[in-house]
């Protein structure tokens, strides 16, 4: 194996491990949100934030800070310091894991750089990844700070934080795939129609994820817990109750949940249609596998979403649904990449 090919494979494996770490971060973040743990840490210190309270006095002092925000006196007025420790430690793990991802990226990057394994033309891509990761940490704190004056964080900031995680993950995954699969597969047909359709599917996946962020931010999953109708209606009563109308798309629980449902159902139909259409093409085994994986993941994701809704958002199932969204996004990216290499 030539040195360049070997180096690229090593870098790709490292980047895929970073993707796996980001996936874990997403799962932890979902659990943090669902257990109302995100506002338990009232300070953000990139240097000293590695150290949690070490004695009872420090725990009581931290708890006193938490008792000053609306989340405590509106949602958790009966919480004691022991209960506070539970939610604090989950948010602490979430933040420390983010820092560890930064180290897990930076240290191998420095090693590959000093070992001369990274081509000069490739270095800017890695620098962009690192900068985006740092900006995501700042965006996370911006999201948390929105909950200091309200019992919940802003659904807009939560959606932005979630979307940024998917963007960073998607960029790293795409670059890693380019290193692993630099060669093109042969195809007997012009598959450009498939490429454009798969790109549209990926855009629809991203839009559905963003709509899910609004659902999470508004706690909209705890309402209308029936399927396929919403309290006996296809379009729920009160869909357009806010004025101006566009506010319903972002701030109306009924409208936000309905939109997320429609996007998910549309995505399911579109993926099945694309999978069926792709059968007319002579494709490589890897491309065919990508389409099968995409179809399987969208069926799983929609099923998890319905189950999460009708079971009134149990934490374990909601976290699984959020993690599965990233796996579906991965399948969509993988499908696009295999088509671009055909």
Image: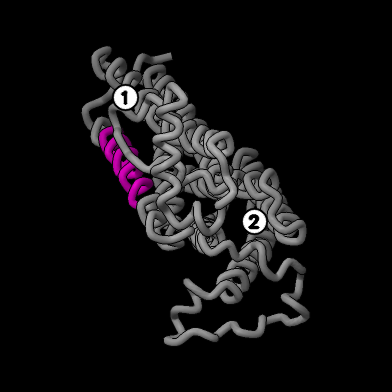
Indicate the position of residue 325 as horizontal and vertical percent values: 59, 49
Q: How many dots with numbers? A: 2
Q: In this view, does 90 lie to the left or right of 129?
A: right
Q: Is residue 331 visible?
A: no
| Place of residue 122 in the rendered image (x, y in percent of width and height, measured from the top left) | 27, 32
Numbered disc in front, either 1 or 2: 1
Q: Main secondary structure of the magenta part?
A: helix
Residue 269, given in percent of the width and then of the height, sits at 68, 65
Does label 1 or label 2 sit earlier along the sequence?
A: 1
Query: Quadrant of the image for the N terminus?
Result: top left
Q: Disc 2 designates what residue?
A: 278
Residue at screen point 43% across, 61% down: 150
Residue 153 x %, y %: 44, 57
> Is 12 located above or below residue 173 in the figure?
above
| Residue lying at 32% horizontally and 39% vertically, measured from the top left | 44
Query: Label 2's element?
Result: helix
Q: Is residue 181 left or right of residue 270?
A: left
Let me know if residue 141 is in the magenta part: yes
Residue at x 43%, y 22% (from the top left corner): 54
Please give the range of residues in magenta.
Answer: 125-142
Read off the residue under disc 1. 106
């Amino acid at each position: 194996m030539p040195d360049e090919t070997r180096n690229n494979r090593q870098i790709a494996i490292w980047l895929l491990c970073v993707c796996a770490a980001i996936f874990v971060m997403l799962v932890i973040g979902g659990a943090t949100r669902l257990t109302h743990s995100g506002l338990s840490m009232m300070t953000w210190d990139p240097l000293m934030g590695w150290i949690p309270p070490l004695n009872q006095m420090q725990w009581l002092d931290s708890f006193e800070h938490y008792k000053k925000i609306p989340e405590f006196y509106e949602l958790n007025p009966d919480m004691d310091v022991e209960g506070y420790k539970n939610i604090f430690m989950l948010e602490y793990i979430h933040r420390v894991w983010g820092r560890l991802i930064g180290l897990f990226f930076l240290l191998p990057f420095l090693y590959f750089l000093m070992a001369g394994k990274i081509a000069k033309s490739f270095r800017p891509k890695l620098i962009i990844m690192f900068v985006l990761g740092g900006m995501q940490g700042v965006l996370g704190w911006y999201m948390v700070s929105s909950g200091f004056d309200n019992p919940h964080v802003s659904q807009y900031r939560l959606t932005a934080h979630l979307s940024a995680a998917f963007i960073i993950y998607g960029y790293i995954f795409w670059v890693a795939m380019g290193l692993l699969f630099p060669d093109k597969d042969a195809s007997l047909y012009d598959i450009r129609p498939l490429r454009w359709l798969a790109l549209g599917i990926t855009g629809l996946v991203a839009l559905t994820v963003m709509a899910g962020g609004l659902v999470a931010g508004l706690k909209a999953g705890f309402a209308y817990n029936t399927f396929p109708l919403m309290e006996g209606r296809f379009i729920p009563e009160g869909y357009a109750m806010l004025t101006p109308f566009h506010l319903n798309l972002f701030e109306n629980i009924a409208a936000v949940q309905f939109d997320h449902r429609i996007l998910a159902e549309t995505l399911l139909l579109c993926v099945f249609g694309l999978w069926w259409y792709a059968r007319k093409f002579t494709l490589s085994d890897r491309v065919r596998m990508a389409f099968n994986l995409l179809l399987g993941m969208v069926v799983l994701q929609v099923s998890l979403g319905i189950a999460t809704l009708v079971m009134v958002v149990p934490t374990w199932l909601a976290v699984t649904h959020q993690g599965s969204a990233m796996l579906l996004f991965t399948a969509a990216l993988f499908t696009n990449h295999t088509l671009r290499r055909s």
